[in-house]
Image: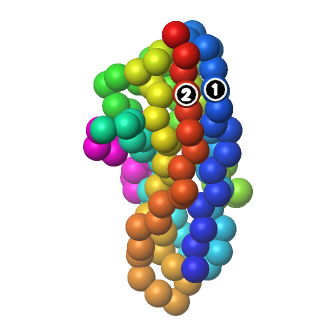
Amino acid sequence: QVQLAESGGGLVQAGGSLRLSCTASGSIFSINAMGWYRQAPGKQRELVATFTSGGSTNYADSVKGRFTISRDNAKNTVYLQMNSLTPEDTAVYYCNAKVVVIRSDAYDYWGRGTQVTVSS
């Protein structure tokens, strides 16, 4: 019913930048929240940055001042600008959206993930 398409991952040297994009499509009535999580090898998935249902933003302490989340509501798209990347940012980055589906309820959706690798 709803699909999340991520793009923008890749390999970058420490100190570099990447920009991730995630677009939601399908039977969308509204999007209550949308953002990014990441999972490094051997670790649990963790929040990186999200827009809440109230429109405010949440950031993990480890990315504050380096990452910026933004969105284009008309395109159902969120972006994650990642600057000053370090090897500790290496992970699979997942887009998440809490979507109210047309003529249905609210559901939690995940993208397939995009790999971000930061070399030292």
Q: Quadrant of residue 74?
A: bottom right
SS at mark 1 in the image: strand
> Residue 94 location in percent, x, y?
49, 48
> In the picture, which quadrant includes the N terminus?
bottom right
Residue at image point 42% right, 41% down: 38
Q: Are marks 2 and 1 in contact (CB under 8 Å)?
A: yes
SS at mark 2 in the image: strand
Q: Is residue 89 above or below residue 1?
A: above
Give residue 117's mark. Answer: 2
Name the amino acid, label 2: Thr
Residue indicated by mark 1: 11
| Mark sitting earlier along the chain (2/1) | 1
Residue at image point 47% right, 65% down: 109
Residue 120 appears left or right of 10: left
CA distance separating discs 2 and 1: 5 Å
Farthest bottom residue? 103
Q: Quadrant of residue 75?
A: bottom right
From which residue to which does the magenta span run? 43-55
Examine the structure image and report whether residue 34 is included in the region drawn in magenta: no
Give residue 65's mark. Answer: none
Query: Which residue is nearer to you in this view: 66 or 100?
Result: 66
Query: Which residue is nearer to you in this view: 118 or 17?
Result: 118
Is residue 79 visible to the viewer in this orientation of the structure? no
Residue at image point 54% right, 21% down: 118
Name the amino acid, label 1: Leu
- Dot 2, crowdedness within 10 Å: few (<14), some or many (≥20)? many
Residue 74 appears left or right of 61: right
Query: Which residue is nearer to you in this view: 46 or 120?
Result: 120
> Residue 40 location in percent, x, y?
39, 36
> Residue 52 location in percent, x, y?
40, 50
